[in-house]
Amino acid sequence: DEAQIKLEIFIEALVPLLGVASVVAGVSAVIIRRRAARRHTPLELRHTLFLKELRNKSIVPKPCDRGPMRAVTVEQITELLRFFQDFIQLRTAYYLNENIIRPLTRHEKVSFAELVGPSVLVFFV
């Protein structure tokens, strides 16, 4: 019975420590998540640089109606591909759309053409 009593005393002393350990673990998890949320991925940093370059070129997003007045030039597409080439590599247009174009246009709520300055459609391919 002495072993049983010692076990009960040990358990009674351990329970509060487990509670403290749980609180410490929870607080640590919150701190780690907040720090991680503040860090930007390399792709997010590249988005920021691309948008900064547009602003440096005095290109301001401007909404326009759909149709032939909302086109992009080959040069605009080429510049996008060149700027993000190390992320795109051999991936598909689905990757380009979801990971590059949508994040770029999300804040302004415009199309890519509106973001980079729409052009008049000459040829439709």
Image (cartoon, helix red, strand yellow):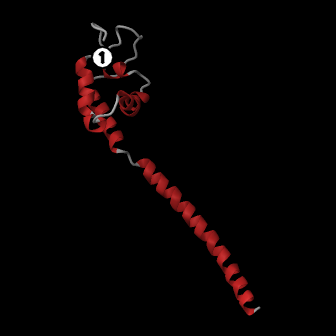
Which image quadrant: the C terminus?
Answer: top left
* Above or below, 65 relative to 12: above
Q: Where is residue 101, by image quadrant?
A: top left
Q: Position of residue 55 (x, y in %)?
A: 29, 28
Q: Position of residue 102 (x, y in %)?
A: 41, 29
Horizontally, is 4 left or right of 80 in the view? right
- Which residue is label 1 attached to? 72
* Above or below, 57 relative to 65: below
Q: Position of residue 11 (x, y in %)?
A: 69, 79
Q: Residues within 10 Å of mark 1 (few under 14, many from 20)?
A: some
Provide the secondary structure element on which disc 1 rests: loop
Residue at (26%, 22%) from the top-left corner? Answer: 76
Residue at (52%, 56%) from the top-left corner? Answer: 30
Residue at (48%, 53%) from the top-left corner? Answer: 33
Horizontally, is 7 left or right of 91 in the view? right
Q: How many numbered marks, from 0 up? A: 1
**What's the amino acid at mark 1?**
Val
Which image quadrant: the N terminus?
Answer: bottom right
Q: Where is residue 23, by image quadrant?
A: bottom right
* Above or below, 87 relative to 61: below
Q: Residue furthest bottom?
A: 2
Can residue 80 be seen here? The reply is yes
* Above or below, 8 relative to 37: below
Can residue 57 be seen here? The reply is no
Horizontally, is 107 left or right of 6 in the view? left
Residue at (44%, 24%) from the top-left corner? Answer: 109
Q: Position of residue 63 (x, y in %)?
A: 40, 16
